[in-house]
Image: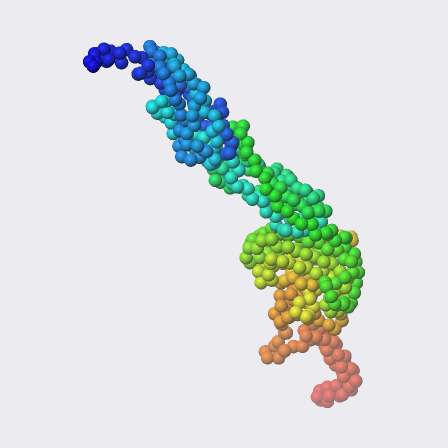
C-alpha cells in the first residue's frame, strides 16, 4: 500500500483542531481569587475559564483536571465538569471543580496546575488557599469546687489554624454562676496568624449549683467564620457563710476549728508571683483583707476563713472577740515572704502550743470602727482580742520571733546616764539638780545669817580691842 506522504502532511497542516492553543484566563474559588479563604473540613468549589487562543480555527478539549500541591486537600486532583469539548476560534468555556475539601489548616496552601488534555497550565499557582480553623481551644478553672458566692477564675487559650481575623473568646455559664464585677463575657483577641496562641481570663462568682463554664472561640476572615467551644466545670459545695456575729470567750473546747456559728468565706488566687503581692478581700468575716507576698511563684492558692466564738485550742489570757481559723492550701509557710492581715481589733496567733501577739498597726479609724493590720509568718488559728495582755503577764513569743509587737520610738531609746569622770550622777540629781542646788544655797544663807546675828558682841569687842 502506497501512502501519499505529501497529501498526509497537507491534511495535518490543514487540520485546525490538532494545533489549537488553549489556556486558563481566570481562576476563582467560591467567587474569590488571589487569596481564597475556606473553613477546614468544609467543601468548596472552584471555576476555571478556558480560552481557545487561536482566533482563526476551532479546537477540541477532551479533559480538564485540577491538581493539588501537597496534601492539604482530601484528594490530590479534582476533575472538571461542564466545559465545552469544542471551542470555536477565540472562544472560552468554563470548567467547574466541585467537592474540594480542605483537611489541613494553613495560610498558603497551593494548587499545582490545571491539566488541559495533556498540557499543564500553571496559572492556578497564583492562588493561596487560607484554610482557617480554631486549631486548639483549652478551658481551665482555677478550682474544681467552690461554695456559693466565692470567686474563682477561668482561663481560655486559643491557637489559630490558618490566618484568622477578628478572633473573640466568649464566656457563658450555667448553674447560676455569674461574671464578677468589671468583667465582660466577650474578650477581643484580634488577628492571629497561623499557629499563634492567645489567652484570656474571667473572674466568676459561684452560683447555687455546679457551674459549667463554656468558652466559645470564633474567628472571621473574608466573611468565613469558624468556631469552637470547650467547657470546664466547678462543683458546688454549698452556701458560703452568713454574716459575722460577735462573741467572747476566755476558754475553748476541743474538736474542729471551733463553733459558735461564725461566718465562713473562701477565696482562690489563680497565681502569685514574686515581687507582686496578691490581695484578697473578705466580706462575711471579721477578716477584712489578706495580702500575701511569696518567695517563689505559686498557683491555685485557696484561702478558707472560718470564724467562731470558741476555739479548739487553749484560749489566750485576754478577752477574745472572735477566733479566725485561716487555712491556706498550695502555699507553704516557708514560701511566704510576707503576709499582712487586715482586721478590726487585736490579733493573736496560736502556733506550736503557744499564743503569740502579732505586731499590729492602725490602718484606718472612723466613728464606729477602728481597723488594724498585723504581719504574720504563717497561717494557723488566730484570736481577735478586745484588750491588751493581762496585768503582770507578757505575751509568750519564740526566741527571736519577728512577731514581737513594735514599741513606740520614744520607749525604745534608752537615755545614757550623766557622768562626771568615772562617777555616774543619779538620774534624780540630773532631773532635779537645779532645784536641789537652790535649796542647798538657801540653807547655807539661812545658817550664815543666824550665825552673824547671834554673836554681834564678839565681833565688836574684837574690833575695839584691836583698835587700841
Which image quadrant for residue 302?
bottom right
Q: Camera-side residue: 254 or 66?
A: 66
* Horizontal side, residue 84 vs residue 413: left or right: left
Q: Is residue 271 above or below residue 53?
A: below
How many marks are shown on the rendered structure?
0
- Which of the 4 image quarters holds residue 443? bottom right
Quarter assignment of residue 381: bottom right
Which residue is at the front of the view, 45 or 464?
A: 45
Q: Residue 168: where, in percent of width, then height? A: 57, 36
Say whether residue 328 is visible: yes
Q: Residue 205, can we see it?
A: no
- Seen from the viewer's position, the closer of residues 435 and 148 is 148
Specify the color scheme. rainbow
Extreme residue toward the front, this view: 1
Q: Is residue 1 left or right of residue 142?
A: left
- The percent position of residue 409, horizontal first and vertical second, equals 65, 64
The residue lying at 74 percent from left, 53 percent from top is 241
In the image, 203: left or right of 73?
Answer: right
Q: Is residue 223 above or below residue 238?
A: above
Locate residue 15, reporting x and y percent. 30, 12
State the image coordinates of residue 20 (x, y, percent, origin top left): 33, 16
- Give 301 or 176, whichever is nearer the viewer: 176
Point out the image quarter for the C terminus.
bottom right
Q: Residue at x 20, y 14 (%)?
A: 1
Q: Residue at x 48, y 28 (%)?
A: 99
Residue drawn at 67 percent across, 45 percent down: 211
Amino acid at each position: 500500500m502506497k501512502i501519499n506522504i505529501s497529501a498526509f502532511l497537507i491534511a495535518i497542516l490543514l487540520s485546525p483542531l490538532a494545533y489549537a492553543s488553549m489556556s486558563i484566563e481566570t481562576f476563582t474559588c467560591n467567587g474569590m481569587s488571589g487569596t481564597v479563604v475556606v473553613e477546614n473540613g468544609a467543601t468548596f468549589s472552584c471555576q476555571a475559564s478556558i480560552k481557545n487562543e487561536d482566533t482563526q480555527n476551532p479546537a477540541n478539549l477532551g479533559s480538564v483536571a485540577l491538581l493539588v500541591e501537597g496534601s492539604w486537600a482530601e484528594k490530590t486532583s479534582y476533575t472538571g465538569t461542564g466545559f465545552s469539548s469544542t471551542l470555536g476560534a477565540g472562544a472560552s468555556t468554563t470548567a467547574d471543580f466541585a467537592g474540594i475539601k480542605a483537611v489541613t489548616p494553613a495560610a498558603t496552601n497551593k494548587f499545582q496546575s490545571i491539566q488541559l488534555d495533556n498540557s499543564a497550565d500553571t496559572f492556578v499557582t497564583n492562588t493561596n488557599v487560607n484554610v482557617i480553623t480554631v486549631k486548639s481551644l483549652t478551658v481551665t478553672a482555677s478550682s474544681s469546687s467552690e461554695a456559693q458566692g466565692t470567686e474563682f477564675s477561668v482561663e481560655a487559650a486559643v491557637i489559630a489554624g490558618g490566618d484568622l481575623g477578628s478572633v473573640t473568646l466568649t464566656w457563658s455559664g450555667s448553674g447560676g454562676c455569674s461574671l464578677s464585677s468589671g468583667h465582660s463575657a466577650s474578650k477581643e483577641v484580634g488577628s492571629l496568624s497561623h499557629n499563634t496562641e492567645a489567652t484570656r481570663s474571667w473572674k466568676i462568682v459561684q452560683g447555687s449549683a455546679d457551674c459549667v463554664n463554656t468558652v466559645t472561640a470564633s474567628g472571621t476572615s473574608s466573611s468565613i467564620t469558624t468556631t469552637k467551644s470547650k467547657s470546664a466545670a466547678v462543683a458546688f459545695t454549698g452556701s458560703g457563710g452568713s454574716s459575722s456575729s460577735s462573741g467572747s470567750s476566755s476558754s475553748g473546747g476541743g474538736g474542729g476549728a471551733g463553733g459558735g456559728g461564725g461566718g465562713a468565706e473562701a477565696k482562690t488566687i489563680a497565681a502569685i508571683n514574686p515581687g507582686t503581692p496578691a490581695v484578697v478581700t473578705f466580706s462575711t468575716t471579721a477578716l477584712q483583707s489578706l495580702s500575701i507576698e511569696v518567695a517563689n511563684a505559686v498557683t491555685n492558692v485557696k484561702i478558707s476563713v472560718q470564724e467562731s466564738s470558741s476555739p479548739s485550742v487553749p484560749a489566750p489570757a485576754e478577752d477574745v472577740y472572735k477566733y479566725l481559723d485561716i487555712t491556706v492550701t498550695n502555699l507553704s509557710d516557708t514560701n511566704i515572704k510576707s503576709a499582712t492581715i487586715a482586721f478590726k481589733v487585736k490579733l493573736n496567733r496560736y502556733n506550736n502550743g503557744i499564743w503569740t501577739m502579732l505586731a499590729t498597726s492602725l490602718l484606718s479609724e472612723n466613728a464606729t470602727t477602728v481597723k488594724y493590720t498585723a504581719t504574720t509568718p504563717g497561717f494557723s488559728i488566730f484570736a481577735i482580742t478586745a484588750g491588751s495582755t493581762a496585768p503582770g503577764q507578757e505575751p509568750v513569743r519564740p526566741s527571736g520571733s519577728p512577731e514581737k509587737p513594735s514599741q513606740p520610738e520614744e520607749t525604745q531609746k534608752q537615755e545614757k546616764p550623766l557622768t562626771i569622770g568615772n562617777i555616774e550622777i543619779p538620774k534624780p540629781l540630773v532631773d532635779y539638780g537645779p532645784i536641789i542646788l537652790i535649796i542647798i544655797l538657801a540653807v547655807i544663807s539661812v545658817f550664815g545669817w543666824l550665825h552673824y546675828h547671834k554673836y554681834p558682841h564678839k565681833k565688836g569687842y574684837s574690833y575695839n580691842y584691836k583698835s587700841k
